[in-house]
Image (cartoon, coloured by chain):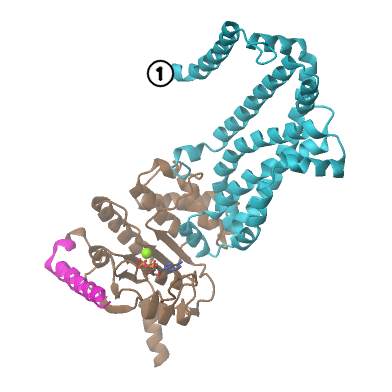
Amino acid sequence: MKTRNQLVMAPFIFTLGFFILWEILCLVLNISSFILPAPSTILQAVWEYRSQLTFHAMHTLWMTLSGFSLAVGFGLLLGMVLGSSRLINAGTYPLLVGFNAIPKVAVVPILVFWFGVGWVPPVMTAFLISFFPIVVNVATGIATVEPEMEDVLRALGASKRDIVFKVGVPRAMPYFFGSLKVAITLAYVGSVIGEQNASNVGIGNLLTRASAAFEVPLVWAALLVLAVLGVAMYALTASVEHSVTGWAQRSQMVA
Amino acid sequence: MQSGFFLLMALYGMEPFVELHDVTHVYARAEDSLPAVRSLTLKVNEGEFAAIVGPSGCGKSTLMKLATGLQFPVEGKVIVGGRKVAAPVKLAGMAFQNPTMLPWRTTLDNILLPLEIVEPHRSRLRRHKAEYVAKAEGLLAQVGLKGQGHRFPWQLSGGMQQRVSLCRALIHEPKLLMLDEPFGALDSFTREELWCVMRDLHAAQKVTIVLVTHDLREAAFLADRIFCMSARPGRIVAEREVGFPRPRDLDITYTPEFAALVHELRGHIAQARQAV
Ligand SMILES: Nc1ncnc2c1ncn2[C@@H]1O[C@H](COP(=O)(O)OP(=O)(O)O)[C@@H](O)[C@H]1O
Ligand SMILES: [Mg+2]
């Protein structure tokens, strides 16, 4: 019982310890707040700029979730197609991998040519950067249905569609929800990159402006807000994963 | 005169149900394009319990796939239920060494899965759910798993999962039951228990059964007819009718006649292995 409590408490204690250590180092080594502000200074800045930070954070959150939702819809569809057809899978794989290899920062200028500065580039960047892991995971889940299971169903006269929807898709769900954790983090990176280069609002844009004006505490405050928001979104998707695919954690199917 | 003869055969259930005539099969993706089976001929009568024994890799699973229309031979003819097989046969139940339960479904819903595929059940299932659930529960009771339907497969032992897999193979009352080493992964006590389950299911359902196994005692205890296969490329090297009266008790496995039969089968297999 005691070790269980310790396990629950450990993340909080280590996080707190990390910031206390940071604070002490800044004090002891007398580091200039221009190089590395102490956590207390950053918190002060967060409080000072709270309304600005909240406004931009909400915008970033909105951009991220929009791009992420697009990625989920598109990723599920494409994953289902790739998972059920070996031909399409083999044919499009090099294209997909090549597309995924392009750093998405390089795509933002093109998005600006097409859509101008505004909300579209961050959403599109978030979408483009995050759909790939969803596609790969869903396709893998569907394509790796046990051959015996497939034989059982085909010997009953099941169509490819029956097999995909009765076995493939449910089977791919743990893979799908697992990929959401990765995808939300990527979408977040994407929307911030988009905002930094092609938007007038959002934490990304705030970062760009604050660093151009050498407002160091504001930059750090924005980073802290980014981190907290990222952890919150990750935790939310992880808890959704946990509650939806409980069977996969107990059966040995997905390690 | 001749029609009278066929009528007699039908009455006694002696009509051939599964026939393979001079079948050769090469897998499309075989690297060496060596056939998996060559010139394979066999006949299993309706209602019969047939066993196929042979060394590993000789094409036993291939034979199953050919007989159910999951693979098509490059040469020869496969006839099931009087019709040439040109598509998956739609009336077969199958069970494998790996029980392949769907972990997100309860045991009961796993058993009902074939009904979601096979007509006429497919369109009746929703409205007559209670009737089908009762049937599944009846099957569960028959294999010694009364009242376990609500549990998930991963809450069951390997032997229990294999029993469920048999129920799933039988729920739609198939005319043909194909078992590919279904008891291969079980300990010997569980295996013998399941032999008895299988024996009783066969007696109750009058289904034609083809059992692939590498356990000669299993074949001798369960089957009416045993086929021995040669090493790859597989063909039938010996066919043996088993005359032990039914219902058989596990005790017969300790009689000299049983030992002699197993010994004889062993001889065929040893010869088949040496032939390569
Ligand atoms: N899908 C496949 N593609 C290519 N070769 C296969 C395939 N399935 C089986 N084989 C080959 O065919 C032969 C017979 O296989 P199988 O019927 O599974 O044997 P058994 O069930 O008797 O152990 C083996 O040599 C195996 O390597
Ligand atoms: Mg096999």
Specify the quadrant that holds the N terminus of chain A. top left
| Chain B drawing hue | brown
Q: Is residue B139 left or right of residue A176?
A: left
Q: Nearer the viewer, residue A25 or B125?
A: A25
Q: Main secondary structure of the magenta part?
A: helix
Under circle 1, the secondary element is: helix
Residue B13 visible: no
Q: Which residue is mark 1?
A: A3
Q: Is residue B57 above or below residue B82?
A: above
**What is the chain letter for disc 1?**
A
Residue B84 horizontal/vertical position (percent)? 50, 80
Residue B93 image offset from top left, x and y in percent: 45, 63
Give A149 or A235, whichever is nearer the viewer.
A235
Q: Nearest the camera: B240 or A185? A: A185
In the image, the segment drawn in magenta is B252-276
* Crowd rating for badge 1 (residues with CA inside 10 Å; few <14, some 14–19, many 20+): few
Left or right side of B200 for A35: right
Which quarter holds ligand 1? bottom left
Hue used for the chain lettered A: cyan
Left or right of residue B166, residue A186 in this image:
right
Q: Is residue B173 above or below residue A215?
A: below
Instruction: Name the spot of residue B150 as percent of width and height, x first.
Output: 46, 41
Q: Please state which amino acid type lies under the numbered disc 1.
A: Thr
Residue ranking furthest to the left: B256
Residue drawn 41% across and 76% down? B34
Residue A187 in percent (x, y) is at 69, 36
Residue B199 or B78: which is nearer the viewer?
B78
Is residue B266 covered in magenta? yes
